[in-house]
Structure formats: structure tokens, C-alpha cells
Image (cartoon, rainbow, N blue to C red):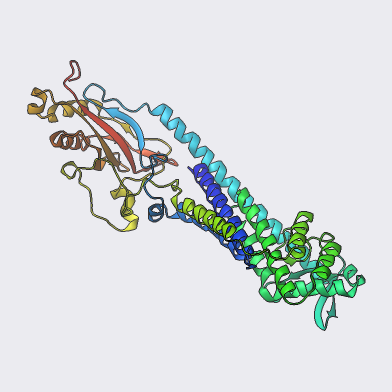
Amino acid sequence: MLALWMAYAVVVSALLGLGALAGERALGAHGRQVRWVWMAALVGSVAIPIGVFLAPQPLTVLSGPVADALPMLSTRGWTASPGDATSPGSDAGASAVRVASTIATALTWAWALGTVLFIGYLAGAYATLRREMREWRPRRVLDAPVLVSEGRGPAVVGFVRSAIVIPAWLLELDEVLVRAVFRHEREHERAGDHRLYGLGVALLAATPWNPVTWWLVARLRLAIEFDCDRRVLDGGVARREYADALIAVGTRASDGWLPTAAFADRKTGVERRLRRVVEPITEFRRRRTISASGLAALAIILVLGAPPPNGAPAGADGEQSLEGMPGEASPWLPPQRPEALSSTRPSFLPYDRPPALRNIEEVRDRLNRFYPAALRDDGIEGRVELWLYIDQAGEVERFVTKTSSGVARLDEAAGEVAMTMRFSPAVNRDRPTSVWVSQWLTFTTAPGSQ
């Protein structure tokens, strides 16, 4: 189940990333800021899957009607009929459940380890940065205070109290280049870009296993630089001077994954920024913007329409939709508090070992006894599928008709038989647990089945 949820998270992240790409294209045609679309995609790629994981019931309303591609409402363990009231072929089922449980446990530990290692990396990087800061020298550039380091920067560091740090070698360059770099970093500081990027990096700790979120963070950093470049150019810096500064400084230093807003960038990032600096904003093209906006809207619709891995198909009112639920045979309870839904409405409840039917002979006898004589004499047969809620003692506490036989009296008889069933309780992590299971009951007049 956890593996399925992780795949769902990757798909949602990829769709949001596609929408962000289209949004950047549309906004870029107007010369607008683009970093916020990437931040929104990053937050959504973490918040939506985690929200589905923690609260699948309220969020299934977003999925709309979908096919039984993710049939997680029940476990189909066995069938029962007058001629075949046997316990489940539970060895294979239990083995599959144990394998799934082992995989889920391994993924959980890998997730936790990845988060711890990533947080440890960030903590170590900041510890190194703070040690370096003790050796930085204060200085003034363009009548503004800066810190001069041996190799760190140009960048903005600090969250509560930020500061611009520039490397000593930068001061040896032409004053025009120094001015362009300084104005870039000051614009980062004024806009709070270092805090925005820091938040993006922090979100990686929630899902470090998702490769798409790493790509989203990289695109967020590039978008932050795009926006800052544009603001600096709009502030009066000449395009030629700014391009020269990017070439001279842009690939000479890097701050890695530290959450800092920095003039330095990877070679590919510098090349993309140079193209935007040298080439002015093209004339607005309606077709290009409409197509990009349409692609972004499609990506968002697909995200909202993706079926959550924990959920069952949802009806128009957001309630769990169960096929064939006639009122005559279903003691369906009215809506209750959210914490009681798992016991009053069919839903997936985890277990390591499924329940096993204990009173097989009694069930066979009850099927014969409760088979309405008038229907038997007329040769009317039927098959009923029930949801059974089996408590921690192995007792059938309640049932819901999932698939009707089409004959109300047979459905009622199936319900009476179901309430006489006795099970060995399901087990989850060595403890008895309540579960919902799917159970077929068949009424037939075939010879030898009585």
C-alpha cells in the first residue's frame, strides 16, 4: 500500500511540475515573475499526497467516479455456499499480506532514514557555514555593508538576520561587474528569495525519495534567479554589463544545496539566464499563452482527478459508493463521527493474517435452513455478496449487502446466515484486529449441494 501511495505522490508531483512549466511559459511571455508557480507546485507535490495519506476519506471526493482500479475497500478471502462453505485459501492470501507488510515496513524505514540523512546533511552544511562566518571580514560596497569571504558567495545568508557575502576575488574585478553582482544580491535580500529557497529545500525532507521534488527545487532556484535578473534589469542595469557579470562570475562559485540565494549557478543555469538577459521579451503571442495556460489547467485537472490510493470510488456526494445496496437486507447505519466510520462503513483496515471461518458445518446447515422453501421449490437460486465487519473476537458485528441476488428474500436470508458465522480474528502486528471482508453466499438447488 505504501509503495502504491509513493507512486501516486510521484505522479502528482510530475503533473504539478508539468503545470508549472506551462505556467512559467505563459507568465514569461508577459515578463511576469515565475518563481511562485514553482513554489506552488512544490508545496502541492508534498501537501496533496501527504493529505491523502493522512485523511483519505475526506479527500476521495476529489477523485470523482473511477473504475475499480484501486479496490482497497475489502479483502476477498473466500466464498461460501451450501456445497462450498470452506475457509479461505488463506495461506496464499496471508503470504501476500505478509510480503506487502514487509515491503511497507522496509519502505517506511528507508523513508525515515532518507529524511534523517538529508536533515543531517543540511545541519552539517550550516555548521560548516557558521564556522566560516567567524573568519569573514565586514566591508562596505557601494556604501552598503557586506561580508567578505575567502571563497563563499556571492550569496545572501541568514534567515532572521540576513547578510550579503561576497568572495575576495570578486573585488579584484572591474567595478562595473562588482556593481552588477552586488545589486543582484541586494535584490535577492530585499525580495526574501533566500527564505523562499530555504523553504523549498526544507520541503525535500518530507519526501526525499521523490525524484520529482528534487527537480522542482532545482527549477525553483532557477526561477528565483530568472526573476531576480529581470528585476535588476528593470532597475536600470545595462543588459551588456549584466551579461558580462554572469559570464565572469556565474560559473566560478557555487553554494550547492545550501538554501541561499546566490549569483553563482551551474553552467546550464547560467546559459539559460544569459539567453533571457540578452534576448528581450518577445512580443506577446496569444496562441503561445493560450496553449501554455491550457496545459497548466489540464495538469491541475489531472491532479484533482487522480484516484487516491487509499480510497474507493466516490459518489457525487462524496460518500463511498457501493454497488447493489438494497435497503431490505442492509442494516446500513447513518453517518457518524469520523473516528467511527471505519467500523460503520466498509473500508480498508490493515492486517497481517486474515480471519478464517471456524463454523463451516454450521454455516452449511444454516444456508439450507434459511433457504426460503417457496423459492427452493420454484427453483429460484441466487448469489449474494456481503461486506462483513468482523470484530476482534471474530464475531460478525454487522454486514452490508454489496451485490444483491436480485431477490429480496434471498438477500435477507444471506444476512441471517452471515450473522451466525464465527471466525478466528484477523491479526495485525500480533494483535487481534477488526476488519471488513467480502463474503459470497450462494443459494442453489443443484444436486449434492444441500
**Can residue 240 be seen?**
yes
Residue drawn 64% across the image and 63% down it: 28
The residue lying at 44 percent from left, 48 percent from top is 308
Instruction: Return the residue found at the far top.
Output: 447
Q: In which quarter of the image is the C terminus?
A: top left
Instruction: Reply above or below: 296 against 403.
Output: below
Residue 405 percent across, percent down from the top left? 20, 33
State the residue in front, 6 or 123: 6
Between 260 and 275, the one nearer to me in the picture: 275
Instruction: Please tell me which residue lies in front, 32 or 53.
Output: 32
Total numbered labels: 0
| Residue 206 versus residue 93 in the image, above or below | below
Query: Quadrant of the rendered structure where residue 190 is?
Result: bottom right
Which image quadrant is residue 141 in?
bottom right
Q: Residue lying farthest bottom?
A: 143
Residue 135 can be seen in this image = no
> Which residue shows up at 31% across the image and 27% down it?
87
Answer with left or right where residue 162 lies relative to residue 169. left
Q: Where is residue 244 in the image (x, y as percent from the top left)?
A: 85, 66
Q: Nearer the viewer, residue 334 or 89?
A: 334
Measuring from the top left, give residue 421's x and y in whole percent: 24, 34
**Residue 191 in the image, given as x and y percentages of width and height:** 67, 74
